[in-house]
Amino acid sequence: MKSEQLSVFLENRAGRLAEVTHTLAEAGVNIRALSLADTSDFGILRLIVCNHEKAQTVLKEKGFTLGRTHVVAVEVPDQPGGLDAILQLMSANNINVEYMYAFAQSATDNAVMIFRFDKVDAAIDILQQNNFSILPPQRLCDL
């Protein structure tokens, strides 16, 4: 139930992000979700893609530094309190959310959030025990 995320470390300069997207576009790799965080010197582009191996290969060939981490894609009721229910559950079980970002999908009654938890396996168990829908990796590319 874990999804793989690529983290691309970028120099904080004009055009570097476009190099990543162009490289992936030329390779036919679809970006399903992303988050970009930066400091004055560098940025971290976090990506959910449909072909991790190909993305990793083409980005490394272009000289990008990459990391791979496991994240959890959770369907969240798209209503007031939907996200809070998950965050309260994690807090009550002493699980930290290191970061999160939204995943765009077609119109449904749910949003999808990508979570990076400090205790990934425990978070998955708790979410499943509380009937939250965790999207398997392939489903992210099918949405």
Image (tube, grey):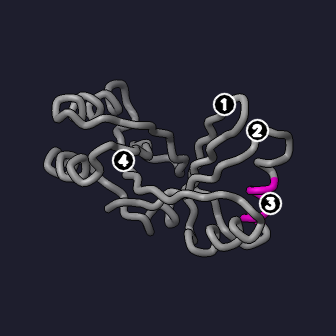
**Marks 2,1: beta carbons within 8 A:** yes
Q: Which residue is mark 4?
A: 75
Residue type at the position of mark 1: Thr
Could you give the CA–CA distance between mark 3 and mark 4, rounded to whole angstroms?
A: 30 Å
**Marks 1,3: beta carbons within 8 A:** no
Could you give the CA–CA distance between mark 2 and mark 1, rounded to whole angstroms?
A: 8 Å
**Residue toward you, 77 or 51:** 51
Instruction: Tell me: 19 left or right of 65.
Output: right
Residue type at the position of mark 2: Asn
**Sequence-first tag of 2 and 1:** 2
**Residue toward you, 122 or 129:** 122
Residue type at the position of mark 4: Glu
Could you give the CA–CA distance between mark 3 and mark 2, rounded to whole angstroms?
A: 17 Å
Task: Measuring from the top left, give residue 59's x and y in whole percent.
Answer: 70, 65
Q: Which mark is residue 12?
A: 2
Q: Which residue is mark 3?
A: 22
- Tag 2's secondary structure? loop
**Residue toward you, 12 or 106:** 12
Residue at 74% across / 73% down in the picture?
27
**Sequence-first tag of 1 and 3:** 3
Magenta residues, as a range? 19-25
